[in-house]
């Protein structure tokens, strides 16, 4: 992993490419474009340059097009190249031409490459674990965005923002995004489990899906088992539990059979008939004890039925790591500021979403390389510190710094910033700092302007 990283940095410097070529090569970008590369126009904003500048915009604190183009202009001048225009029109036009499937393909490639290179010790009992969770993000209030991603129905027109629902599949071993889906926030087939079903082709035999109780329905478990994947989820609160029934495997650990419910409207008759009449699952009671607090109980459901190969304690520890998906989403939405995107058309919004995931994967790649070099797990390394370190060290590639010395400095600095292991940390969602005392918007802004005129 480290050798390939150093080789990529050295090749990017030899080609005299933009900084981000060290993390995502031009060859890989051209491969993702395929035949679409042949029809691309532009002497400055080539596919690779457009992607690199877009990545720099996603990773910057300002997130503005002006800053992204200014960075390209400064780089070209430092290289003695003809300067590009400081205006953002050409860059925005190039971004408009990015095919969505190309951006999504780069997400999958960058995520899978890091996951496949992970040391076996980072796997859970030899399995690839997929940590699944959902969230939302908002976007500018434009007619085009409202038409495709309507705001929450309870909000008055002009007072809310278009909102999209997302489901992201993370690698538990390295934290990269392996696949994702997005859709409307409300409506038929827009729930998290519905979006996740569109990602089932990602699954391979022997994978373990780790998720919350939203994904614990009978058909969700049966469809995953049909693909040869295993499941570890929290049991839905409406399904009763009685450890006196079924086949006992240990204390608060037994096998039970769930009868197939009636066919849901979203499932075809052929799909329904292909599923078994009964589904055998394992129920385990997990007790979470925290010093100074009353112990909590969590009921976990899994299709890993062998109590010898998968003891209850191992399942409990695995389920407690499900929280890692929440932390990964926080890195995306808070650290990378993906909670509110900036583009004004749905196509650009989706590309902005995919580009944030690519940027996130590239940071996770550096974290994985640094962790492997230091002999620690990648989830113990700080995501934000890695982003800050990259932001300061990437420009040094333009100077006469030896490649190995630069890589040593970067990887040592990244591995030095660790996060505490606090699985039971509790922080109430309250703010100490008071916001500005502006009134809330209760009608379109134009109404306020007319009254003030």
Image (spheres, grey):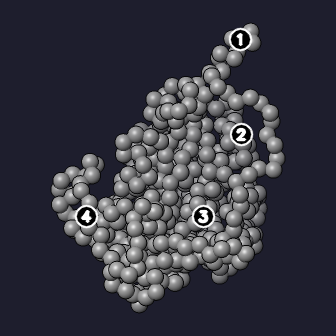
The CA span between labels 3 and 2 is 24 Å
The residue at 74%/29% (across/down) is 439
Residues packed near mark 4 inside 10 Å, few (<14), some (14 to 19) or many (20 plus): some
- The numbered disc on residue 67 is 2
User: As drawn, is 326 to the left or to the right of 453?
Assistant: left
Q: Which residue is mark 1?
A: 451
The CA span between labels 1 and 4 is 61 Å
Residue 238 position within the rendered picture, expressed as x and y whole percent measured from the top left: 42, 61
The CA span between labels 4 and 3 is 40 Å
Residue 335 position within the rendered picture, expressed as x and y whole percent measured from the top left: 68, 53
The residue at 39%/64% (across/down) is 239
Query: Which quarter of the picture shows residue 405?
Result: bottom right
> Does 139 sit above or below residue 247?
above
Residue 416 position within the rendered picture, expressed as x and y whole percent measured from the top left: 75, 73
Earlier-in-chain disc, 2 versus 4: 2
Disc 1 secondary structure class: helix
Q: Which residue is mark 4?
A: 260
User: As drawn, is 435 to the left or to the right of 297?
Assistant: right
Disc 4 secondary structure class: loop
- The numbered disc on residue 364 is 3
Q: Is residue 165 visible in the rendered structure shown here?
A: yes
């Amino acid at each position: 992993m480290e050798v390939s990283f150093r080789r990529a940095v050295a090749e990017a410097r030899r080609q005299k490419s933009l900084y981000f070529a060290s993390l995502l090569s031009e060859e890989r970008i051209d491969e993702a474009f395929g035949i679409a590369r042949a029809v691309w126009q532009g002497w400055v904003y080539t596919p690779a340059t457009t992607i690199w500048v877009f990545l720099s915009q996603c990773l910057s604190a300002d997130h503005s097009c002006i800053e992204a183009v200014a960075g390209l202009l400064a780089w070209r001048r430092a290289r003695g190249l003809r300067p590009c225009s400081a205006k953002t029109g050409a860059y925005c036009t190039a971004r408009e031409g990015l095919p969505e499937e190309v951006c999504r393909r780069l997400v999958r490639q960058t995520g899978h490459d890091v996951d496949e290179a992970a040391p076996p010790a980072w796997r859970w009992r030899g399995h690839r674990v997929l940590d699944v969770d959902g969230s939302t993000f908002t976007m500018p209030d434009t007619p085009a965005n409202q038409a495709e991603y309507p705001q929450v129905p309870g909000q008055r027109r002009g007072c809310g923002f278009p909102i999209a629902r997302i489901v992201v599949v993370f690698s538990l071993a390295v934290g990269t995004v392996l696949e994702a889906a997005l859709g409307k926030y409300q409506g038929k087939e827009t729930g998290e489990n519905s979006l996740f079903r569109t990602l089932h082709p990602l699954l391979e035999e022997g994978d373990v899906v780790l998720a919350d109780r939203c994904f614990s329905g009978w058909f969700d478990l049966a469809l995953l088992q049909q693909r040869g994947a295993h499941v570890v989820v929290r049991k839905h609160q409406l399904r009763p539990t009685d450890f006196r029934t079924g086949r006992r495997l240990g204390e608060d650990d037994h096998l039970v059979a769930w009868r197939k419910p009636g066919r849901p409207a979203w499932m075809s008759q052929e799909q329904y008939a292909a599923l078994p009449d009964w589904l055998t699952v394992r129920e385990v009671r997990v007790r979470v004890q925290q010093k100074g607090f009353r112990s909590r109980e969590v009921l976990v459901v899994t299709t890993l039925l062998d109590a010898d190969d998968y003891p209850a304690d191992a399942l409990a520890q695995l389920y407690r790591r499900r929280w890692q998906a929440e932390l990964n989403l926080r890195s995306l939405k808070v650290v990378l500021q993906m909670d509110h995107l900036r583009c004004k058309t749905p196509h650009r919004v989706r590309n902005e979403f995919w580009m944030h995931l690519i940027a996130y994967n590239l940071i996770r790649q550096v974290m994985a390389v640094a962790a492997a070099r230091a002999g620690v797990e990648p989830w113990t390394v700080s995501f934000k510190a890695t982003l800050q370190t990259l932001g300061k060290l990437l420009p040094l590639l333009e100077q006469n710094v030896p490649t190995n010395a630069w890589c040593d400095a970067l990887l040592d600095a990244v591995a030095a910033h660790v996060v505490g292991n606090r699985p039971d940390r509790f922080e109430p969602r309250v703010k100490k700092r008071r916001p500005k005392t502006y009134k809330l918007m209760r009608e379109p802004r134009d109404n306020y302007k007319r009254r003030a005129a």
